[in-house]
Image (tube, rainbow, N blue to C red):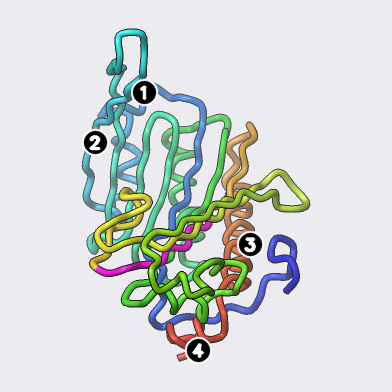
Amino acid sequence: MDNPLKAPVPEDIPLKFAPLIRVLAQVRFPLIASIQKREYIAAFQEAIRKDYPTLRQERTQELTLGPQGVVSTESSTIWRFTDRTGNWRVSVAPSFCAIESTKYSSRKDFISRLEVVLQAVEQHINPQLVDRIGLRYVDQLTDLKPADIQSLVRPEIAGILTTPVAESAQLYTNELRMEIPGGQAQMMARWALVPPGSSIDPGSVPPAPSISWVLDLDVFEESQEPFDVPELTTRAEAFAERIYTFFRWVVTDEFIERYGGGQ
């Protein structure tokens, strides 16, 4: 394909040993202060408790830099709901809801789970507007040498790792922000060679004991619109298809074979 931002979505090739470590969808909305109250979140918990039976309350503290230095501001609550395996997590906070997985099986399954969560949010929290919707896929390749990257991804992505410098490379990061034709959505693509025990995003990408290579693709749209579950679900599915198209543009046939494509 010439341009993965507008090319037709390629046929799915399931990877038996997929290096996909995290998929996250998030919908942001104007602040709803009542979400911090236990009694307010109870009905939402009941709606999803069969699938996400474990609830944890997290407190976050925002910091701002002022004339007197770093100043702590008002704390906020995030409600975390996890499934029995610990591979799926739903989060609800005063300004967003999210679902994430470390055991992704298919686009259809993920979008279906997202739809159920959004329906529960609509019914029991009832945000009127959406400020932002985003979808993120993170791949992490481990147990490789920097020079291996040149055979696994296209030369434009491998960059300097296609040269003899790869033998000495330890850290190599790239970031590209793009507009997706035909709408207001944008894609943020990040890829990096990361040293052992390090991470470019500790909250989403765990440090690996060996050199690793990370591909982080995030499609999002920032515009204030009504909170409409069918529309949000449709948009998230379109984002997932665009991310997969870009992913297939990045990787080579050798990548597909190495990670079990078609097995």
Q: Nearer the viewer, residue 19 or 58?
A: 19
In this rendering, is residue 84 above or below 17?
A: above
User: Can you identify the residue that label 1 sits on?
Assistant: 34
Q: Quadrant of residue 100?
A: bottom left
The disc, 3 or 4, on the residue closer to the chain's N-terminal end is 3
In the rendered image, residue 195 lying in the magenta stretch gets the answer: no
**Which residue does the image show at 56% across and 29% down from the upper left?**
128
**Which residue does the image show at 37% across and 76% down from the upper left?**
145
User: Can you identify the residue that label 3 sits on?
Assistant: 242
The disc, 2 or 1, on the residue closer to the chain's N-terminal end is 1
Q: Which is closer to the viewer, label 2 or label 1?
A: 2
**Circle 2 — which element?**
strand
- CA gap, disc 2 and disc 4: 41 Å
- CA gap, disc 3 and disc 4: 21 Å
**Amino acid type at mark 2:** Glu
- CA gap, disc 1 and disc 4: 48 Å
The disc, 1 or 4, on the residue closer to the chain's N-terminal end is 1
Magenta-tinted stretch? 210-217
**Amino acid type at mark 4:** Gly
User: Can you identify the residue that label 2 sits on?
Assistant: 58
Which label number is shown at residue 262?
A: 4
